[in-house]
Structures are given as structure tokens and as C-alpha cells.
Image: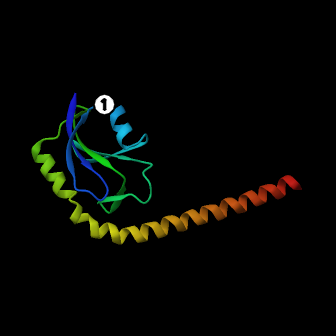
Amino acid sequence: MKIKVLLVMPGKETQVVKIPANLKYIKAFIGEKLFKIKLNENTILIANKDAPHDEFNRLLRGNIILGTFFIVSIKNGRRVSMKRKDIRKYANIFKLRKHQKKIELYKEEYLEEFYSNQRKIKQKNAKRNKEEIFKIAA
């Protein structure tokens, strides 16, 4: 069974697409590790947990969503086609022009913080490895 969903890709306008309702297809399209954000009682956003850190897509509640994601309607715990009203609502919420400027501002701050944290982790690991080597050598 195919369902209508809203596809949101980085740097592109939202699109209504028909996809198979099974999770296997969604994982093949978006990525293996998925996370879901409940937008309202009948609608969820499905995105890739391991999306590349340079694929800034849209902002949601002050958080940046990375990579491609779907917006899907839910009924009785199952994925179903979105209604026209919901498609219009979320297509308007996730319009590219509404998010582009904000994303550019957050992008620099986010990447700077991300790479700073990566450097700290590497330094911490290097120090720990050095201590382990000295313990083994002693």
C-alpha cells in the first residue's frame, strides 16, 4: 500500500510523494537509524539519526534537523496518507525560504561547537590512551 507523505530535502522545497507504507522502504530512503518527532496527535516527522553534520535541512522548535526527512500521518499506530489540510499546513511550516536564513545563522555556530567538541573528545581520548600506555609499560 502506498501512502502520501511530505518529503523534505536539504536545500529544496517540500514535495508530496507516494511511498510504500513499510518501514523497510523508509529506512532505505532516509537511513537505517531513524528517530521520530511527534508534531501533533496524528503526524510524525521521521528523520535519520546519523545524518551527516553538514546536511542542514530545517529548524523545528529551535533544533536543527539534519538530512532528508518525511512527514507522515499516523492512525491507530499505522502510517497512513496525509490529508490535504495537513499537507498544506506542513508544506507551509517547512517552506525553504522560511528556514534558509535561520539555518545559515545556526550553521556556523553549530559547526563551530560540533568541531570544538570533537577536538575535546580527541584530546581526552589521546590523554587516556597515553595514561593507559604508561600503565602497561610500568
Furthest residue in direction front, as rendered: 12
Which scheme is used to colour this image of the protein?
rainbow
**Quarter of the rendering occupied by the N terminus:** top left
Horizontal and vertical percent position of residue 46: 32, 44
For the image shown, how many numbered marks are present on the structure? 1
Please state if 49 lies on the left or on the right of 84 as rendered. right
- At horizontal 66% and vertical 65% (from top left) the residue drawn is 123
- At horizontal 48% and vertical 70% (from top left) the residue drawn is 112
Q: Where 77 falls versus 51 (above or below)?
A: above
**Quarter of the rendering occupied by the C terminus:** bottom right
Horizontal and vertical percent position of residue 47: 35, 47
Horizontal and vertical percent position of residue 132: 78, 55
Residue 60 visible here:
no
Horizontal and vertical percent position of residue 69: 31, 48
In the foreground, 113 or 11: 11
- At horizontal 60% and vertical 65% (from top left) the residue drawn is 120
- At horizontal 14% and vertical 47% (from top left) the residue drawn is 86
Residue 4 visible here:
yes
Q: Where 72 falls versus 65 (above or below)?
A: above
Query: Badge 1: how crowded within 10 Å, few (<14), some, or many (20+)?
Result: few
Furthest residue in direction top, as rendered: 1
Q: Amino acid at mark 1?
A: Asn
Q: Where 102 falls versus 81 (above or below)?
A: below
Furthest residue in direction right, as rendered: 138
In the foreground, 25 or 40: 25
Q: Quadrant of residue 134?
A: bottom right
Q: Secondary structure at mark 1?
A: loop
Q: Which residue corresponds to mark 1?
A: 22
Q: Quadrant of residue 135?
A: bottom right
